[in-house]
Image: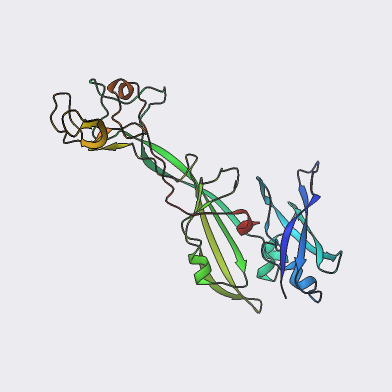
Amino acid sequence: MSASITAIKVGGASGVGRLDCTREYVLIYLVETTDPADGSIIVGNCPGMPRRGYVYGFGNEYDLGALCQSVTPRQISKLVWEVTCQFSSKTEDPDQNMENPLVRPPRIEWDAETFLEPYERDANGKAVLNAAGDPFRAPLEREASRLILRFTRNEATFSPIEQAALANKCNADTFMGAGPGCAKLSAPKAVWKYENDVGYWEKSYEIKFDSKGWNEHPANMGCRHYAYRVAEPGGMPQKVKVLAEDENGVVSTEPVHLRADGWPLEQSEIEAGNIVYLDYQPYERIPFGPLFS
């Protein structure tokens, strides 16, 4: 006794913009059940299906002002259903006309935060180096900003384990125009409330956006690098790791810049600002679309 979305019907996505600036959208989902006795309630509430009051989202696009107005399942074969979800930016005032808190639209707030970030090139593309052509020991920093989306909606259930699993996850899909890895979800919060004879959870989600992504990009540096050395007279040179040395052959006390293959980077490349950066993904990525559609 279960149902799952198999796809959005081909040709089942449409939208219209009107002269009064309202927008309307329609999404038709194909849903498959495991039991012929499964009806419209099970189908209309299957995982990933928009609920009344959810925002419109399809593929790479979102309209935070258009909310789901209706969910209409229709059986087309023994185990397959079509579910038509209609969205509109023309909604009633939720505080006056929606006594059931579970059907109220979400509250959406955009904010921003500022922070300091290191930079290796200035706004004109000039490499940030000292007069000797070397990077500064302490990198220069500049002020940067991130957008923050706060999304609050009322939900009937709350699972601490499921919500904790969402903490510190990045988007695997394009979300609100941000490419994969550019949006990060903080741990969701929930408050139990009771209103108009209905108990519900007020859940709050906070998503931070970084146009450069949330991967880490440390400079490729180290106190050792690859070099060829002869182990014994007349032997063949062998590729080994050696301690980095300065121009006088003295072991360096500071890490040196490396090429992508682990060999030392030429000084001319450093002075040209062609420093090699590594790429690490510290956060797991999951699709954000199903969470907020």
Extreme residue toward the front, this view = 234
Please say whether residue 226 is visible from this viewpoint: no
Residue at the spot x=81%, y=65% of the render? 80
| Residue at the image point whose x is 16% and y is 36% from the top | 253
**Residue 91, quarter of the rendered image:** bottom right
Which residue is the extreme one toward the bottom? Answer: 197
What is the count of numbered marks? 0
Image point (63%, 59%), residue name? 106
* Horizontal and vertical percent position of residue 2: 71, 72
Q: Report the side of 264 relative to 26 (left or right).
A: left
The residue lying toward the viewer, choosing from 149 and 276, is 276
Tell me where residue 32 appears, x and y as whole percent.
Answer: 76, 65
Q: Is residue 271 above or below residue 184?
A: above
- The residue sitting at the right extreme is 76
Q: How far across and how far down the image is residue 196, in percent?
A: 66, 76
Quadrant housing the N terminus: bottom right
Quadrant in the picture for residue 231? top left
136 versus 32 height, above or below: above
Q: In this orientation, does residue 162 appear?
A: yes
Q: Please state which of residues 256 and 183 is positioned toward the viewer in this rendering.
A: 256
Looking at the image, what colour scheme do you see?
rainbow
Residue 5: % across, % down: 72, 61
**Most foreground residue, 118 or 67:** 118
